Image (cartoon, rainbow, N blue to C red):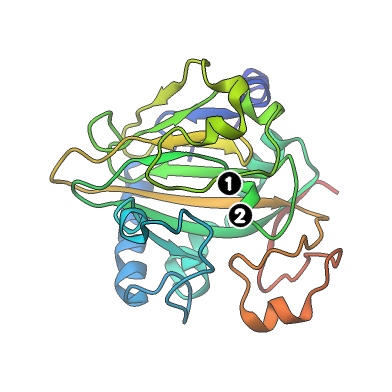
Amino acid sequence: MKNELTTEQVNQYQENGFLVIEDFLSADELASWRSALTEAVSKRGGDKLPGRKDIPDQNDPEDKSYYNNVFDQLINLWQDNEKMREIMLDERLGKMAATLAGVNGIRIWHDQALIKKPWANPTSWHLDTPYWSFSDRNAISIWVALDDATYENGCLFFIPGSHKKTTYENPGIGKNMGVIFDVYPEFKNTKSVAAPMKAGSCSFHNGLTIHGAHANMTPGFRRAMTCAYMPDGNVFNGTQNILTDAQFAKLKVGDPMNDDAQNPLLYSSK
């Protein structure tokens, strides 16, 4: 794993809100991640979360069938698959995320397999952090390509620097690719940056960086394994997101988000 970061990479991330790392995984590591994903997805049986078919819908309600053909989304595979648990709880990933985000400690918010099936719809421009149960401008995600992510099958695109000005307003992922610019018109004329990646490469991005992805215009799959990270010390903002009904019922706005069983601390410099 290419887990050592240079000062230049950290500065690039903090300036642009994203960073691409080529050849992040070795060939053997890529094979292990692919094997773990195949096993975990098969075991999950289509459920988005362990024991749950779906999460509260926060996307465009007008056409759920459109969103369902954007990607297959399976969350917290680390919680019910040992191979994925070993991968996701790697302290090296936590240290990278903390270093790029500029925070002392980092917790898993959730992992997420994002699988664009053949002929899948584009992923419209959106933000990540507004979906989550905490609000932090330094939240960060890793996105690891398990297949080549190309212009043809749905590579990522980013709006550089957008994380410095966006807020927690988010129109969700729907049919309209550019609806987010109704909320953030200052970025409507900003040139986007494409991030095609060979399998085994990765990107990191801030949860408030505007990003999206092409449609899959091929008969093949575009698999990615991602993980969203929460800076340590965050509190509950009132949004349920991935929390179970029982967890949600116990929390009050302002309560600390420090449940090590749900959100393990991966790394702390303290």
- Residue closest to the far left: 219
Residue 176 picture location, percent across and down: 40, 39
Quadrant of residue 89 within the rendered picture:
bottom right
Residue 245 picture location, percent across and down: 63, 81
Q: Is there CB contact under 8 Å for labels 2 and 1?
A: yes
175, above or below 258, in the image: above
Q: Residue at x 54, y 30 (%)?
A: 181
Quadrant of residue 207 within the rendered picture:
top right
Q: Is residue 25 visible?
A: no
149, above or below 86, in the image: above
Q: Which mark is residue 163?
A: none
Quadrant of residue 210 within the rendered picture:
top right
Q: Name the residue type under label 2.
A: Tyr
Task: Name the side, left or right, on which 112 lies relative to 18.
Answer: left
83, above or below 148, in the image: below
229, above or below 215, in the image: below
Q: Residue at x 48, y 15 (%)?
A: 191
Residue 268 picture location, percent across and down: 78, 51
Q: Which residue occupies the foreground of this view, 24 or 170? A: 170
Q: Which residue is mark 2?
A: 131
Q: Name the residue type under label 1.
A: Asp
Task: Name the side, left or right, on which 214 lies relative to 205.
Answer: left
Q: Which residue is mark 1?
A: 128
